[in-house]
Image (cartoon, grey):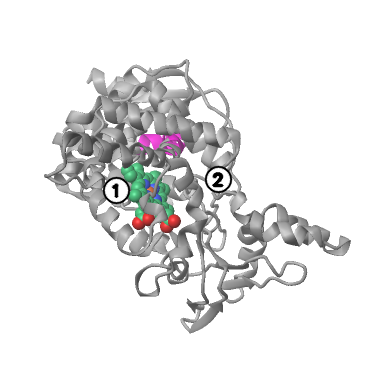
Amino acid sequence: MISRAYFAKWFEAASIYLPATMQNFGERLLKDPIPFAVSTLYDRSFENDIAISYPAWPFQSSPTLVVVSGSMQNMLAVTSYGDGEKLDDASRQPLGFIKEMAGTDNIINLTGAASIDQRKKIKPFLTERASLDKVFADSRKIFDGLFDHWDTSISLRDNVGYVCTSLIAKCVLGIPMLTREQAGVVIKAGNLLRESEPGKPDFVAGEEALAKLNDDLLTLHKDVLLSDKNYIHAKAAIATSDSETEKFAKLLATRGVSNLLVESNLTMLLMTGIGYVNQSPEIKKRLLDEINSHPDMTLESMRKLSYLDCTYKEALRFSSPTPIIIRATSKPADLAITDQQGRQKIYRASAHALLFAPIRRMHHDTCYWKNPETFNPERFEDPEAIKHFMPFSLGTRTCPAASHFNEIIFKTALLASVKYDLQFDKEFERIPADSLTSRWKQEYYVTKIEESLQQREKNRL
Ligand code: HEM
């Protein structure tokens, strides 16, 4: 997921000189360099676990494209590029479009000390015990309510998206509640990140709506935000000597509400889990048997349910909500690549290269997974399965919500959803392995919800 505008400056010049003989190859590159990287170059990378496409005439002004595959170590060479000792502030430029939508720097756009500082500020709300207890309690309550009173008039995406956005708002940002309309502004802005680009009228309108939502919510909840511990308060870096006016100005300047944009990853994951589990009676039965054996579910007991854990991992693999990690270089970069025999070799990517770690392709590759297009939690009963599994990226910039926050929300959502038989209005569309968005194009509606037969039997006993 990246703005095409980012590539325009490289490809515009080349297009003018494009000779007819190069048109096929050239057009693919010009229109969409990322599909070329994720499909053709990924396939080519299997020879040496890396494929490098150097710009040739007439594409001298285009970037070198580098794609890695094979081991996690090789993927790490890309995901960790630009941080730590080999700091390269340009490494996050491909994510500049998120900054445009957010209206300010976001952790994900930052490098060096600035990103370390922001990670430190957000992590307590995603990893500390007290925060996770709250996430568990809030998440259980909100998902029970969602499925008990399912709104059939709105799509699965809007139902689940509203709950995910509200949970992140409450548990991480300290915003106690959202209306459906407010969550809708966030959902729309997330769609524009994938479907539009900075400067286009719809993108600008989304940006403005998100900025207004920031100001409305932070004004409404100013007192609770300033008196409580939450990420927006931490980001505002308020000094004790600040006046009330200064405090409020700093709060607004955080544009903290834009952090809600991560909801789209979580929502896609949950929709995949809820949808595919509900469509497979065998998976559902195994889950219900496991869940029903723990009548007093606590955070600890929930995390120990092994089949539920396999289902979580399979939903992450299958949906791969972040399909690809991209880094840019502003100087020559040496990448240490290990081949299948364990031999390491250094490959040099030139300055102004784009480096790709194609997560989704790896998660759907028949070299690593048996029947990758089948949703099958059992595959994760084999401990070897995680050898090619990296839904949250790798290294120091891995998703800080990876180990606990997302897991708790996913698992509590499944606990609530498997109690019902859900009927979807159509079959889920297949998302190709080399897709760049990992999102369904269509909306799905749950037209009927009943207590499942198994649950009814259990209640009768
Ligand atoms: C299933 C849900 C999610 C998935 C698959 C996911 C995936 C990822 C991935 C792959 C990255 C690394 C991006 C890169 O290196 O370019 C990332 C970064 C990040 N994620 Fe998540 N994420 C999810 C949910 C969340 C949630 C719910 C939050 C917060 C409430 C969150 C907060 C962050 C932050 C702050 C970063 C930036 C970390 C940094 O740059 O140091 N994520 N996420």
Where's residue 303, x and y in %?
24, 46
Res 264 → quadrant: top left
Q: Residues within 10 Å of mark 2 (few under 14, many from 20)?
A: some
Nearer to the camera, 119 or 38: 119
What kind of secondary structure does the magenta stretch mostly adopt? helix
Where's residue 117, x and y in %?
26, 57
The answer to whether the beta carbon of the residue marked 2 is less than 8 Å from any atom of ligand 1 is no
Quarter occupied by the C terminus:
top left
Q: Residues within 10 Å of mark 1 (few under 14, many from 20)?
A: some
Is residue 274 within the magenta segment? Answer: yes
| Above or below, 8 relative to 450 | below
Q: Nearer the viewer, mark 2 or mark 1?
A: 2
Residue behind mark 2: 437
Where's residue 129, x and y in %?
15, 47
Instruction: Check disc 2 and report its element: helix, strand or loop.
Output: loop
The residue furthest right is: 20
Report the residue at 41% width, 19% height from top: 449
| Above or below, 439 relative to 362 | above
| Label 2 vs 1, first from the N-terminus | 1
